[in-house]
C-alpha cells in the first residue's frame, strides 16, 4: 500500500459548485478535486504525527475559490473555518458556499487582522510567491495564530521546480532572463526570488529543504513534523510543524459525583486549557480549566486561574466500579493521578 493510499480517509462528499471566476479550474474536474484530496492527505499525516485529534478552528490562507477549502469542509464538517485571501470575491464565494468566516488579506502580514487561535492552518502556494523577508513575516504571523498543539501545513517549491526550469519545462510567468537568474541563484544559495514584471512584492520563490527548515527552527516552541518533497500534487514540497505545549495538571478529586483539579500550559502561562473527562473510556464532557485558586497562584501556576470541576452524570453512581480519566482536550496527555478507579 502506498503512503497516499494509507492516508486516504473516508470518501468525501464535497460541495461541487465551482465559481466561474476560479482560474485554478481549467476544465478537468478530477485534477481540480485531487488538489483538495492531496492537501487532506498532507494534513492527516501532520495531525497523526502531532497526535492532534480535536480540530475546532481552521484557517485556509490563501483560500482562493475553495479548491482545498471544500475538502476541509467535507472532512471537518463541525469546524469553524476561516477563508482568507487578497481576492475579496474569492473570500465572499467561500463564505457563502462553504459556510466559512470571511477574512480579507493584505500583501503585508502585519496589516492582516486575524484572531487566533487555530488548531489547523493550511497555507497552499503562498510561500511559493513571496520574497524572503515577506516569507519570514508570514511565517511569524501563522505561528502567532496557532493554538497550543496547533498544526501548520504549508507548501513550497524547491529542487523539482528548479530542475524543471533549468530544463526549459515551463517558465512560471517569468521572462527568459528571470528564469536563468532564479535557477542560478537557487543553485548557489538554496533559495531565490524573482519578481513578476511590474510587481516587486510578488513573483516566484524557490526554497531548498535546508533553507525552509532553518526558518522553522527559528520559531519558539515549534517542532518540525515532516518535510515531504513534492508532497502536494506531485509538485510542491510540503512542510508541517506543530506549536508545542508543556502541559501539567493534577486530578485532585474523583468520585462518582464528579471530578476537580487543575491543568496548565507552562508555555502559555496566562491561557486556559480545556480538559476532557472520560468514564470507562467514554467521553462524558469537556470543561475549561479557568477557575481561580489561591493555592495555584501561590505555587506559581500562571495567574491562578487554572482550576476546574466537572459533575458526572447520575448513572455513574450505580454501585459498580468505574475508571475516571481526565486528559488535556485533543491530546493523549493525562493529568497526574489519572486515571482513578472509583465506586459509590
Image: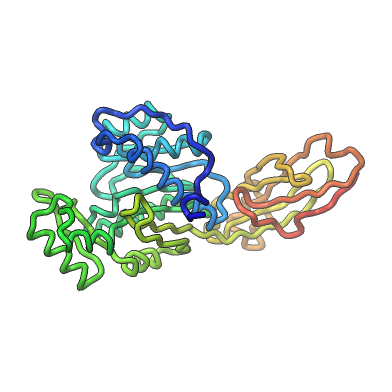
Relative to the observer, which residue lies in front, 134 or 281?
A: 281
Query: Going by the picture, which residue comes out furthest to the bottom?
Result: 188
| Residue 31 spot, x, y in % from top left | 33, 40
Quarter-wise, where is residue 30 in the image? top left
Residue 9 left/right relative to 20: right
- Residue 277, above or below 303: above
Quarter-wise, where is residue 93 in the image? top left
Residue 207 left/right relative to 82: left
Is residue 52 among what the camera can see? yes
Relative to the observer, which residue lies in front, 65 or 172?
A: 172
Is residue 117 among what the camera can see? no
Q: How many marks?
A: 0
Relative to the observer, which residue lies in front, 206 or 299?
A: 206
- Residue 66, above or below 321: above
Query: Going by the picture, which residue comes out furthest to the front?
Result: 1
Residue 239 left/right relative to 19: right
| Residue 28 spot, x, y in % from top left | 29, 36
- Residue 238, above or below 98: below
The quarter of the image holding the C terminus is top right
| Residue 334 spot, x, y in % from top left | 69, 56
Relative to the observer, which residue lies in front, 29 or 258?
A: 29
- Residue 278, above or below 179: above
Colour theme: rainbow
Residue sitting at 45 percent across and 42 percent down?
58
Residue sitting at 63 percent across and 52 percent down?
328
| Residue 62 spot, x, y in % from top left | 32, 43
Residue sitting at 51 percent across and 60 percent down?
244
Residue sitting at 32 percent across and 29 percent down?
18
Amino acid at each position: 500500500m502506498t503512503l497516499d493510499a494509507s492516508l486516504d480517509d473516508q470518501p468525501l462528499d464535497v460541495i461541487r459548485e465551482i465559481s466561474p471566476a476560479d482560474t485554478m479550474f481549467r476544465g478537468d474536474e478530477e485534477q481540480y478535486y485531487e488538489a483538495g484530496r492531496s492537501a487532506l492527505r498532507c494534513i492527516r499525516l501532520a495531525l497523526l504525527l502531532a497526535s492532534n485529534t480535536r480540530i475546532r478552528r481552521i484557517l485556509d490562507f490563501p483560500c482562493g475559490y475553495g479548491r482545498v477549502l471544500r475538502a476541509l469542509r467535507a472532512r471537518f464538517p463541525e469546524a469553524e473555518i476561516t477563508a482568507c485571501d487578497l481576492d475579496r470575491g474569492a473570500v465572499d464565494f467561500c463564505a457563502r458556499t462553504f459556510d466559512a468566516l470571511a477574512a480579507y488579506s493584505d500583501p503585508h502580514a502585519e496589516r492582516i487582522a486575524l484572531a487566533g487561535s487555530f488548531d489547523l492552518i493550511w497555507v497552499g502556494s503562498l510561500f511559493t510567491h513571496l520574497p524572503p523577508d515577506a516569507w519570514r513575516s508570514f511565517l511569524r504571523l501563522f505561528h502567532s495564530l496557532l493554538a497550543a498543539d496547533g498544526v501548520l501545513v504549508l507548501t513550497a517549491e524547491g529542487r523539482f521546480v528548479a530542475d524543471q526550469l533549468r530544463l526549459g519545462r515551463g517558465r512560471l510567468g517569468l521572462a527568459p532572463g528571470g528564469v536563468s537568474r532564479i535557477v542560478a541563484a537557487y543553485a548557489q544559495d538554496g533559495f531565490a526570488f524573482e519578481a513578476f514584471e511590474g510587481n516587486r512584492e510578488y513573483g516566484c520563490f524557490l526554497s531548498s529543504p535546508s533553507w525552509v527548515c532553518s526558518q522553522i527552527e527559528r520559531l519558539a516552541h515549534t517542532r518540525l513534523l515532516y518535510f515531504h518533497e513534492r508532497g502536494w500534487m506531485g509538485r510542491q514540497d510540503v512542510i508541517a510543524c506543530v506549536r508545542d505545549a508543556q502541559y501539567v495538571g493534577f486530578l485532585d478529586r474523583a468520585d462518582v459525583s464528579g471530578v476537580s483539579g487543575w491543568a496548565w500550559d507552562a508555555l502559555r502561562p496566562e491561557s486556559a486549557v480545556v480538559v476532557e473527562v472520560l468514564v470507562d473510556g467514554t467521553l462524558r464532557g469537556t470543561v475549561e480549566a479557568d477557575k481561580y485558586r489561591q493555592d495555584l497562584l501561590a505555587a506559581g501556576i500562571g495567574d491562578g486561574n487554572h482550576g476546574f470541576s466537572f459533575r458526572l452524570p447520575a448513572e455513574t453512581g450505580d454501585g459498580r466500579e468505574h475508571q475516571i480519566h481526565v486528559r488535556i482536550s485533543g491530546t493523549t496527555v493525562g493529568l497526574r493521578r489519572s486515571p482513578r478507579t472509583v465506586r459509590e
